[in-house]
Image (spheres, rainbow, N blue to C red):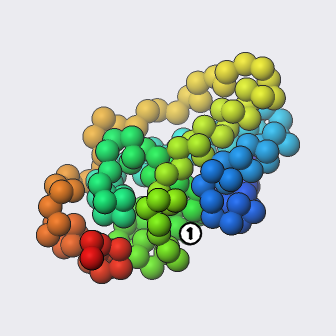
Amino acid sequence: MDETEFWEIVDSTREAAEGDPEDHADLLVERLLQLDPDSVLDFARHFEARYNRAYTWDLWGAAALLLAGASDDAFDYFRCWLIGQGREVFEGALHDADALAELLDDFDEDVDGDGEALGYAADEAYEQLTGVVAPELGIAPQTSEPVGTPFDFDDDAALAHRFPRLWERFGPE
């Protein structure tokens, strides 16, 4: 599976789910069940590689702003959700986290930002196809610290300075 096919699967299942993260995960599993097990593992490798690339202080800060706080787990789920938003949003946010202000049509912290189930979709599909747990993917684990310069997510002034467009659009009222 190449990168284009990976993103086509992500996009088509998100569109069919009409943006609902839970439905998106269910549809993603259904779509992956149409593939052979090796292709499901290829999908999982693409997903994991992007998940690791998104381990940055800037994206964590953007998640904290959008979600009104982001624990380690919340940031993990946010990165899965971000991948689920498709290539344009993912790559745009990776390049400039503040660009999420323009890349996202809307953001409802009660629905958006939590893609935990997306992160397990390939594992679930592989297990259903084979009856066994998916093997290790052979991808180096993410670094112990996010990439970039750390800052205090609880400091509103720092968030507003670092993400002026996101702050203007989605910051506290």
Quarter of the image with the C terminus is bottom left
**Where, by quadrant of the figure, is residue 160 drawn?**
bottom left
SS of the residue under disc 1: helix
Q: Is residue 73 left or right of residue 136?
A: left
Q: Is residue 159 left or right of residue 10?
A: left
Q: Residue furthest top?
A: 132
- The location of residue 21, given as percent across then percent down, is 60, 55
- Which residue position holds label 1? 88
Residue 41 visible to the viewer:
no
Q: Is residue 129 left or right of residue 49?
A: right
**Where, by quadrant of the figure, is residue 97 drawn?**
bottom left
- The location of residue 147, given as percent across then percent down, is 30, 49
Query: Going 47% across and 66% down the picture, which residue do you hit?
Result: 108
Q: Check the image and report above or below for 107 versus 78.
A: below
Query: Going 20% across and 52% down the picture, which residue do you hit?
Result: 150
Q: Check the image and report above or below for 40 versus 93.
A: above
- The location of residue 105, given as percent across then percent down, is 52, 77
Query: Going 18% across and 57% down the picture, which residue do you hit?
Result: 154
- The location of residue 69, given as percent across then percent down, is 29, 54
Q: How many other residues sit within 10 Å of disc 1, few (<14), some (14-19) or many (≥20)?
A: few
Closer to the camera, 126 or 70?
Answer: 70
Closer to the camera, 138 or 105?
Answer: 105
Q: Amino acid at mark 1?
A: Glu
Q: Check the image and report above or below for 150 versus 132.
A: below
Residue 127 visible to the viewer:
yes
Query: Going 14% across and 69% down the picture, which residue do you hit?
Result: 157
